[in-house]
Amino acid sequence: MAFEQLSLPFEGHLTPTAPARIPRTRRVFVNRNLKMAGIDWVGFDMDYTLAIYNQVEMDKLSIDAVIPKLARRGYDEDVLRGITWPIDFPIRGLLIDKKAGNVLKMDRFKVVHKGYHGLRELTKEELRSLYHQKRVKPNTGRYHFIDTLYALSEVALYTGIVEAFEARRIELDYATLFTDIRECIDEAHRDGSILDVVLSDLPRFIERDPLLAPTLHKLRSAGKRLFLLTNSRWPYTERMMTYLLGDAMPEYPSFRHYFDLIIVAAQKPAFFQERRPLLERDGENLRPATYPLERGVIYEGGNLHDLEAALGIGGDRILYVGDHIYGDILRSKKESAWRTAMIIQEMEAEVIAHEMCREEHQKSAELEQRRDELEDQLRYYQQRYKDLTRKIEDAAQAAKNGHGSGSGSGISYEAERGRAKRAVERIRGMLRSVDAEATKLEREIDQRFHPYWGSLLKESIEPSSFGDQVEEFACIYTSRVSNMLAYSPLQYWRSPRDLMPHEL
């Protein structure tokens, strides 16, 4: 039986409140203007979106679940169990080079800036030799892009095994190792080695956000209709969502009452690309869905085309909130006109680190300006040196041809050329000093963000490859769904003016 629609809107949902300064860690950041007044439906992913996972505990659990599975594939279990797994090593946006066994970080132009083999940082010479002679092609079979929090344990496993096995001179095929790790992780999710443990101790693995229910309530009170679209299967979804929302507000007898539509086992990104049929649950049985879709019924599978037809609205009136660039954000943007919000759990730490580095960023800008000034001076004296050399040669040639001794002017030119040469050497020394200071400062800034990789969203002065995708495919982004509570449900989110270099 379908649930009755709550009486909406609730009184007071648009009552103006005194403006409060929202902490930067809890702000919504805007890439493209988004008028919430024009949004009719707001959809949510569940894992890492509505459900905030404790990443350290999840990584430990995933690694523990995978070790016996790798051992059954021939990896030395004693060595595996003796490894101190580097769960603080990976971040999202890394690239696995399955041929060389390296882990890399790129900027938006696919230029590799940092890399590790095991836990050994690759030198600039190694990076140049391996990745700067030819353009890196991340979409080829040689590479694998890490864009989900779910996949961080795969990187920790890969790095830890490369480090430990090579230290013991145990031969490895890097590509096979990565395939084995991925298959074992997938198997652990399928057979319950991971999900059953999560459900048995939800407080250990899940942060229950007390502001999540009021956030959904506020959206509904403004007349928005909400749907849940998750790849998780129904038994897991029911337990997880009941933990998050089941008794959060008396107006909602169960988590189902927050949503006008619930679709599980959606198989994103295939949901956005293929035409899989939509099924509805009848107890433990599945049958083809009947239309119109009903509130309170649990649906499985489906596809973008049929969902939009069932909702009866165009894509740009739907906002989808997810955490996965490829599965949730990129595919929904490429295959539809849906507006997109990306949940980046790491944003709170990222913003705090950025705030701590303001003085260092200012110093870095000053060093960059000083470098530009010194390079201008260097070019001047280098050109001066060349001009004087030519004059000396011309004077000598003139004297040889009997057009004058040239001795006076030649001596004058020699003295001036000597001064230009000393200036070139002095400025080069100053540039080396500036470069060394800038390199040291950049390393210090990186350490504020992450001990191995620096900022999640930046690499040097450019967006990182991950930051570039966030900028390109997410209309808005924030650290958690409940951050929207501080804004009006009819908010007009405006992006800052994006200046091109010639406008600066």
Image (cartoon, rainbow, N blue to C red):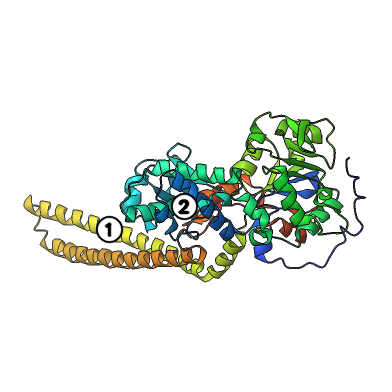
Q: Nearer the viewer, residue 45 or 484?
A: 45
Question: Is residue 365 in sight in this rendering?
Answer: no
Quadrant where the C terminus is found in the figure = bottom right
Q: Nearer the viewer, residue 185 or 385?
A: 185
Q: Which residue is mark 1?
A: 382
In screen coordinates, is 492 left or right of 58?
A: right
Residue at screen point 27% across, 63% down: 424
Q: Nearer the viewer, residue 282 or 331?
A: 282
The percent coordinates of residue 24 (x first, y second) are: 65, 64
Quadrant where the N terminus is found in the figure = top right
Q: Is residue 155 above or below residue 326?
A: below
The amino acid type of the residue labelled 2 equals Leu
Q: Is residue 285 above or below residue 353?
A: above
Q: Which residue is mark 2?
A: 157
Q: Residues within 10 Å of mark 1 (few under 14, many from 20)?
A: some
Q: Quadrant of residue 245?
A: bottom right
| Number of numbered discs | 2
Residue at screen point 32% across, 51% down: 126
Question: Is residue 174 in sight in this rendering?
Answer: yes
Distance from label 2 to label 1 (Cα)?
52 Å
The percent coordinates of residue 309 (x first, y second) are: 78, 31
The percent coordinates of residue 131 (x first, y second) are: 37, 45
Q: Residues within 10 Å of mark 2 (few under 14, many from 20)?
A: many
Q: Earlier in the sequence, mark 2 or mark 1?
A: 2
The amino acid type of the residue labelled 1 equals Gln
Q: Secondary structure at mark 2?
A: helix
